Amino acid sequence: TKARRVDVHRDEQHSRVPFFSSQNLKPLFIMCVIMMLQQLTAINAVLADAIRILREMGFTEPRICNAGMSAAFLLFTFGSAALTDKAGRKLLLMVFAVLISFSLGLFSLAGFLKEGLQMALLTLSLGSYVFSFSMAWGSIPWVLSGELFTVENQGRAISIVSGVNWIFNFLTVFTWPLLTDALTPKWVFLMYSMCMILGAIFVGVFLPETKGLTLHQVTDLFAVDAPQYITVVHRVSNADGSTSGTIRSRNTQPHTF
């Protein structure tokens, strides 16, 4: 049929996008920075040092607390899966980047307080940190990795993005004890907190929202003519003129603003 021929033509057209074209390099740059930011949350450094941190916070059974923290990561990640398609990737990354920055800031602030207040603040900041990371930055970067690239270039692009993630994973874990010894933990937490503020700004400026778009529509966003898609709201009216509800649909035609 004609519609099927059009779909086949679009598939062929997208598969011919060169790897070093701007349509592929733009999302590649965005994803490399996002993967770097995922590690600059200091998540793996904190987890690697969790037993010592919990012991210094005063917990008598740090191993049990660490297991509970891991369970909380798993639980909140399921919550992220439920929110991702409703709230959108961009909004969640921005909001929880700010909350991660706030949590790391509380870690830093605790280092300036007396022991009694320090314990309470560290407990609050740890819970906030686990929640904030799990709800967005733990899973959404990997979701975006499968959405931003054309089918032809996904393999190479995702390999590069994963490599960047592992490189910064190594760097954060390797430099963590060096930085904490040189600067003390409170200043290191403050440094990572500032990184997440910059991360929220980066996401807001460079990452397009992909919620509700097909793969072709997402990759079209990085083309030279960069189409944008809007949500169309259809109101359902009864015979007497009253409105019984609305139907929301994503339009398939690009709109230029």
Image (cartoon, rainbow, N blue to C red):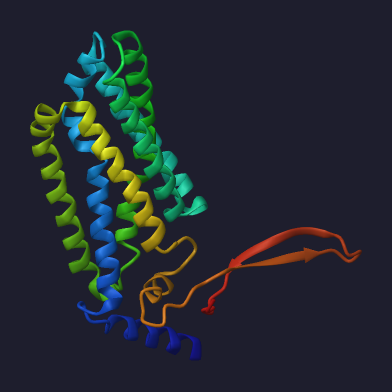
Query: With respect to residue 56, does 227 lie above or below?
Result: below
Query: Which residue: 20% across, 78% down?
Result: 20
Query: Which residue: 19% across, 51% down?
Result: 165
Residue lying at the far right of the rendered structure? 240
In the rendering, at what x and y percent does residue 94 appear? 41, 49
Query: Which residue: 37% across, 50% down?
Result: 200
**In this rendering, position of residue 236 left or right of residue 23:** right
- Which image quadrant is residue 132 in? top left
**In this rendering, position of residue 211 left or right of residue 190:** right
**In this rendering, position of residue 174 left or right of residue 192:** left
Query: With respect to residue 227, does 133 lie above or below?
Result: above
In the rendering, at what x and y percent does residue 104 appear? 31, 32
**In this rendering, position of residue 97 left or right of residue 253:** left
Query: Which residue: 30% across, 67% down?
Result: 27
> In terms of depth relative to the viewer, which is nearer, 96 or 239?
96
Query: With respect to residue 138, does 154 lie above or below?
Result: below
> In terms of depth relative to the viewer, which is nearer, 88 or 216?
88
Q: Is residue 138 visible?
A: no
